[in-house]
Amino acid sequence: MLDDDNLTPHTSYRSSGRSYLQERLDMPMGERPSATVIRRSKREKSNLKISEDDKSEKHPSSPETETKRIVGEIVERPLRKSEDDLKQHRTTRPKSRFSQHRKGKLCQPSGFPSTQVPLGALSRKNAKLLSTSSERNQSIPLAKEITSHDPENDRVSSISDAGRMLSQMSIQEITEQKQELEEALSPETLEFLRNRGQGRKEASKQSMIKPNYTDVSVKRPTDDREEKERLANIVSSIRTIEDLDEAYEKEIGPRKSETGLEGKNDWDKACSLLRSTAPRQTLWAVRVICVDLERDWNKGRHFPSNAESLDWPYPILLPVSLRCLLDSPVAHTNGLLLHVYTLRALYALLKLRAPTEHVIDFGKEALESPQLLYQDVFLDDALPTPPYGSLYPPADTTTVMSNDAGDAIAYTTSSVSAQKDGEAFLNDPLWALMSKMRIIPRLAQLLESRHELPVEGLVAMSGILSMLSVRSAGSASAIARHSTLLPSLLHQTVMPPTNERTTSHFLEPTITFPIMLLLNNMARQSKYVASQIPYIDFLLPLLGIDATGSKHLLQVQKWALIFWRKLLRYGLGLSGLSSLVPLSIQHISTESKLATAYCTLFAAWLDCVKVFEKAKTIETFKSSLQENELKILSSTLTWLWPSIRQCVNSLGKKCVHFDYTALSLEASKMRLVSSFLAASTASNTMNEDFDNLFVVLAERMFGIAKSMDFDRLLEHFLYKCTKQEIFEDMSTCVFLNELLTLGSVVRSWGAKRGQSEINMILSTLRSKILNNLGVHHARSGAIQSKLALCGNNAWSKQCRFTLLKFLLEEPREQRQNPLLLRSYAINLIGQLRLGDEAKAAILFGSEGLFTEDDTLSSPVANMFMRELCKGRMQLDHSYKLQRGFGITIDELGPFGLISLLSEVEKGPSKDGELLPLGTYWLWQVLSGTLDENIASVSGVNAVCEVLSCALQLLIDLEDDHSKNLNPFDSLCMGGKIYFLMNIFLFPESVFCEKDILSKVSILWEKCMVGLDASFVADFFSACLDHSQLKTNKIRRENRVDPKDEMLLAVMTGTADNSSKTFRAIQDFLSDLCTSYQEFGAQYEEFTIGIRLFLMPQFPYKIRYEVMQRLREVSHLLIVEREFFDKGLMKNALEKVIRENVPPEGEREKQEILDLLTDILRGKQGGKSGDFFFLFAVITLSRELLGVINSGFNGLKNSERRLLVLPDSTAQIILDATSRVMRSKNFRRSGLIDAAMHVCSERSSISSLASEMLLEKPCLEAWITSLQN
């Protein structure tokens, strides 16, 4: 009898529409069981009386209170329908993973680590399979009362109950129940249930065998304690997921794959499980991918998007999947661990795909990268950057992004859009991640999470943001405009904690340095971005910390000062400088590791003072500054006077014994002093103290100039640069650059003060520089390692410009070796890039640099100055990057600077872009285009003046070739010949000028000296480059490799005619032949140039096309003096005839031979003795000798050609061939001598030969008789 107090309401499991086994499998582990055991009441059955009212009171929400027994005393639980019951039975414990299993998806991935593991494999041990039917609940007898929890008793009881239940069922009912179970369970679960008893049966069989206690492999009961202790020690040693995996494999062995991923490695499995619905599977997958990607990057693998030859080895949808994972909710067990791995994987993926110029790495070698050394060692914030659009393809569409905090941040995608986003990532990874995948709002939300992001995640996030910021100024602006992203990141890392907000990552060594680099990268993009960074909130507290003994904190403080220096380059960051001066005194006086950063920061501050003193009368300028900023600028010279005096007194003391570490410090002192002198000159505040300071400065500079260390630095800079490390090279360059800059400032400052002793210092510097320049004025080669961003050796280029500018400041009549300075300038101009427009303008504007006449300016220099002024915005920007005032009317200098990038952002228009001019820039003047005014007399004269000036400059440089002063000495002769030929394309009104013709003739003779076969590939390369420059505003930094496969294919005649190279050559030849037919045949220079294409080094298709186009005027391909001078004729023929006779030499193409025969048959090749006639005769005679030497191979073709030729021409060919056969001289010289002799003497052919030509086989018989 059931007791009233123990009676619990239940409902049938059939009411839910699901089988009991399904309900049992869905039961969360550890939660309340689905059935309740009701014990038998102690009272008699007759004493139990339950009325309907009692039932309704106890169960108001249940329509009926009768309970149904299932097995023994197990009754059903009623279905809770009311809200009160739901609240009463709601548990606060977390859901088990089994509760995620839903009907209809039993075979889908829902566990860890496999995706298709049977659910029974993860159920509790000794779980009982209960299969029942509601229709038979009343007929099942009660089981015996179970009072023990022995597993064996449970098993026996379960088997007994199952047997009784089955005995009361018919075969049809058993079949139906079996079918129901099979339909409800997955095949894997059925297989598991069928096989789960086999192990127990085998164990029972083994137990029947009497154990041999002498066998040590059999465990004794006494070993259980030791085994438990061993397992406990293993479990206690597990701290990470890696430890768990290692312990599992050690104890159990490698996991068997049950996910359908057999045969795949961990990477493939991880990619398959990356979008799994099981959290642990996803975490494992992203961890594997993160580790593998970071390992690939550390091994040096890189697949930049602008390198078309490198294939992307990773799945195209990998970045899309990682971005989707970033939207996963925060787990209550491991917090943001999944997001940390995802951020690290995305960061590694960006580094692997982004162009080298945009890779930001925080690894061990980060401080040794050229990007950071350029700012830290070379002390320049205007880091050279590639032009917009040169690294990425243009975007097809523009995505309008909103960075408001309230916008939706989830990244939703479909199969189609995911594929497109993956392809967009391959083309432009940074832009795709920011615009298409909306990474910025999601990062901001992660920072606002109640879970604090670990340091590894913050580092990866900083790396992603840094790479996004260097992508473009717009990307950095999107980061700065976000209302919470940057403030949250700074609050968690570098801002001092407050009562309202605390963080455990304040000044964490691992994260503070990446944060400083992020701020520096953002500030470099634009003035607007720099103005959005709340620097005053953390810079002064950070710099006020005593970093003695902390190498890491010193690095962070140094880059904090560099960041503040960038702010001052824009005229920002003036607030707080008054508090910074006291902090700097100790560092500058003791010359600590922060002294260099403090000196350069104060130098940028003084640049602002220089502009302020010049423009303080302008009301618009004064109104743009705050009152406290005006006070700071007015008091700067007074505040910094002690620091200036300290720098002057200690100048040059550490510049000894090649202490490269001290060179940057000495350079920073000189920059601070030169900025102070410039600001003092502008403010007219010089007094007696200034005079005394100047005397000390002159002594220090003279000591540096006279020291042997200065000579060694010059020698290293000019000759031994290829053996230096980047750090040493930069240190040398920055020291020389700042020393010569200080010399230029001292020159003007001393002239105003009437100080004559400065001339002695400058003369000493000048003489040492000129002596060291010598014949090796140009640096031979570039540093090859780690020059991705500064590949043009920007620090060396800046130093050479400063050196040349210093030498050009001397009056023209006092200059020594002007040809050396001109050659040096021409070499330097060819290496200038975007952002160096100010350097080019200064060099082109230098008096007498490009002309010998004192009264005239150089037409070439004037032409380039006009081109530079067309891009006025870019030119003004370049002057400000050089720390100048600019070329605008207001001359605001740093206050008008809008970016520290090389290129000013001026919209889609690219008009006015001139740089880079390229290595052949002076030769390219000969290939310039003409404007619409060329028809006028003044226009023709202007073009003639430019061409004449350029030709004269090139002649002077080629004349000085023996002295190694020619900047184009290292250039390939093929490129020079190509650009010289371009002068033939000018109209006859320009080309016919006697001055131009004479200079072209002189230059042509110089170029033809020592010409070999290698020039053809260089000729093709220059032609291809020049053809692309006509349609592309983006200049390439390097020429096409002469060994390029495409060029080799064209040279051998195997390339398709539609290739870019062959089309460029065809276009050039078409224009050249047209000009020759119109007017060029009357000029010997043009004739010599066009005959160059008959050389055998050119592909036969090129030679064939030239001969085909010029067949009507082929008789004009002769120079008059060659007709009378056989030596000149022989030299001309040797250039166009192959060296040896076949089979030693290569045989001519049949198309060439047929064309020559056709031209001679039509008597278009000229008369006997003309250049083209001799060329054709020698070529056909050489082929005939090849037929003889190869055993009559090609005899019919040669006979066919001879039969169609005029008799006299055929006789000349046969006679020349016979003379070569008799002389046994089968070389090129023998062929030429024989043909010229036959044509000059016109000897008669033998009677045998003339008779045999009239009958067949005449040629074979003639050859046989000739051999006999």
Image (spheres, rainbow, N blue to C red):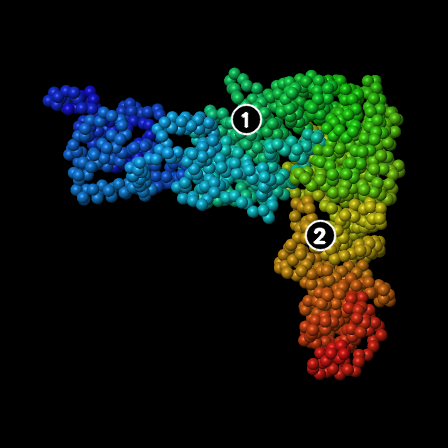
Under tag 2, what secondary structure?
A: helix
Q: Earlier in the sequence, mark 2 or mark 1?
A: 1
Which numbered dot is residue 1022? 2
In the picture, the disc for residue 1181 is none
Q: Percent from the top left, x then y, of residue 192?
A: 32, 40
The location of residue 945, given as percent across then percent down, is 81, 49
Which quadrant holds residue 96? top left
Q: Are marks 2 and 1 in contact (CB under 8 Å)?
A: no
Q: Residue at x 65, y 58 (%)?
A: 1049
Disc 2 versus disc 1: distance between alpha carbons? Answer: 51 Å
Q: Quadrant of the N terminus?
A: top left
Nearest to the observer: residue 931 or residue 1000:
1000
Q: Residue at horizontal 75%, vertical 65%?
A: 1140
Determine the image quadrant of residue 763.
top right
Amino acid type at circle 1 is: Leu
The residue closer to the viewer here, 111 or 169, is 169
Looking at the image, which is closer to me, 655 or 927?
Answer: 655
Which residue: 66% across, 17% down? 579
Q: Kindly tell me whether residue 997 is visible in this rendering.
A: no
- Crowd rating for badge 2 (residues with CA inside 10 Å; few <14, some 14–19, many 20+): many
Left or right placement of residue 87 versus residue 615 in this view: left
Residue topped by disc 1? 489
Residue 731 visible in the picture: yes
Say which element carries label 1: helix
Quarter of the picture holding the C terminus: bottom right
The residue under label 2 is which amino acid type?
Answer: Ala
Q: Position of residue 44 (x, y in %)?
A: 12, 21
Name above or below for residue 1069 compared with residue 931.
below
How many other residues sit within 10 Å of disc 1, few (<14), some (14-19) or many (≥20)? some
